[in-house]
Image (cartoon, helix red, strand yellow):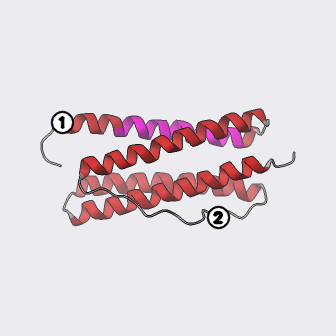
Amino acid sequence: MRLHPRIAGFLGQALSHEFLAVQQYLVQSRLCRLWGWQDWAESFARESREELEHAGLLSDQLLRMGIAPSAGALRPSRPGRDLREMLDQDVAIEWSAVELYAEALDFSQRMRDERTASLFAQLLEDEKGHLVHLQETISSLGTHHGH
């Protein structure tokens, strides 16, 4: 099967997006650690590791297709000045991932690239799960005291 250039483009965009998310969550984890919020620091560090795993899966797929993975230049992270702002920034990142992966999944299916479609379906479900978790966390902030 010939590689459609748009599939390669989606994989490259996805890889860049995942590295942006790794950077975002890592910076937030380190900020929380500096502020003494150990639980939040661990939570953001876990998210960073999950996004790094996604980057690994995308890199594997690119390598299988004979393409050297390259995430390109990342935009600066926007960690937020407080917890609510951090979570709002993360919702924006996860939402853009959901949109990207839905479009990439649809295109991969239309091109009958089942392996890539399967990868994008997995990533889409993971990112939807992250989005739901973030939205639930934001909703619970109003009912809890502290950070």
The residue wearing badge 1 is 142
Residue 82, image quadrant: bottom left
Q: Nearer the viewer, residue 82 or 52?
A: 82
Find out whether the residues at labels 2 and 1 contact each other: C-beta distance under 8 Å: no
Q: Which residues are magenta?
A: 116-134
* Residue 60, position as x, y percentages in the image: 67, 56
Q: Residues within 10 Å of mark 1 (few under 14, many from 20)?
A: few
- Residue at image coords 47%, 51%: 50
Q: Main secondary structure of the magenta part?
A: helix
Inspect the magenta stretch and tell me whether residue 133 lies in it: yes
For label 2, the SS is loop
- Whole-angstrom CA distance, mark 2 to mark 1, is 40 Å
Name the residue type under label 1: Gly
The residue wearing badge 2 is 70
- Residue at image coords 37%, 37%: 133
Q: Quadrant of the N terminus?
A: top right
* Residue 104, position as x, y percentages in the image: 66, 40
* Residue 10, position as x, y percentages in the image: 67, 48
* Residue 67, position as x, y percentages in the image: 75, 61
Q: Is residue 105 left or right of residue 135?
A: right
- Residue at image coords 60%, 62%: 71
Name the residue type under label 2: Ser
Q: Is residue 3 left or right of residue 29?
A: right
- Residue at image coords 72%, 38%: 108
Q: Is residue 102 left or right of residue 87?
A: right
Q: Earlier in the sequence, mark 2 or mark 1?
A: 2
Residue 4 vertical position relative to residue 118 in the rendered view, above or below: below
Residue sitting at the far left: 145
Residue 140 vertical position relative to residue 22 in the rendered view, above or below: above
Inspect the magenta stretch and tell me whether residue 58 lies in it: no
For label 1, the SS is loop
Residue 107 vertical position relative to residue 76 in the rendered view, above or below: above
